[in-house]
Amino acid sequence: MEPTHSTHPRARQNDILVERVGDETIVYDGERHEAHSLNRSASLVWQHSDGEHSVPQLAELLGSELGIEPDESLVEYAIDRLANAHLIENAPAESLSRRDAVRRLTLAGAAVVGLPIVLSMVAPTEAMAASGNQNGQGQNNNGP
């Protein structure tokens, strides 16, 4: 099976804010008003995706940093998750299905400790914040 990403991924740097919290990285996408929390392995892949490092090089780096065997499947999975979050500039045209990704990771014997995780949430826009709905519940138009 051929990888579904560029062989030298490049992390997106435009219109984002980055904050490191311990081993994790919080990335706010100002263009899409989304916040993404990257665990240590996803963060390492994203930080070193500079268009110069290849997938095998990223796997070596990730393995060294996490103290696990280098695993290209982990890097490919991380790149896929990061691309789905619009954090990779040269994102693939198609992404791995969750089933394919899990199968590849299982076949590779990936350690759970190294599994890249990208959690995403939509941040409220200024218009949403100014809507006047301060209590977080929907408005009731049925009268008093």
Image (tube, helix red, strand yellow):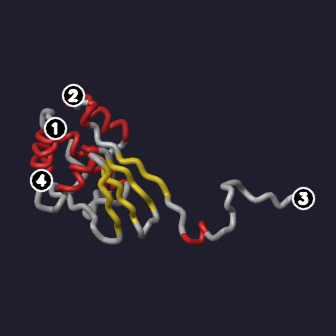
The three-letter code of the residue at mark 3 reads Pro
Between 103 and 37, the one lying in front of the other is: 37
Give the alpha-carbon distance from disc 4 to disc 1, as whole Å: 13 Å
The residue at the far right in this view is 144
Circle 4: is it few (<14), some (14-19), or many (20+) Cα within 10 Å?
some
Up-down relation of residue 23 to residue 133 (above or below): above
The residue labelled by disc 3 is: 144
For marks 3 and 1 on the same chain, the one whose residue lies earlier in the sequence? 1
Tell me if 76 is positioned left or right of 34 in this view.
left
Q: Amino acid at mark 4?
A: Ser
Depth check: 31 or 80 in front?
31
For label 2, the SS is loop
Q: Nearer the viewer, mark 2 or mark 3?
A: 3
Q: Which residue is mark 1?
A: 71
Q: Where does residue 28 sit, x and y in percent of width and height? A: 39, 62
3D distance between C-alphas at marks 2 and 1: 9 Å
Q: SS at mark 3?
A: loop
What element does badge 4 sit on? loop
Residue shown at 80% from the left, 58% from the top: 140
For marks 4 and 3, the one nearer the N-term is 4
Residue 89 position in % (x across, y down): 27, 64
Per the image, the residue denoted by label 4 is 54
Contact, CB < 8 Å: mark 2 with mark 1? yes
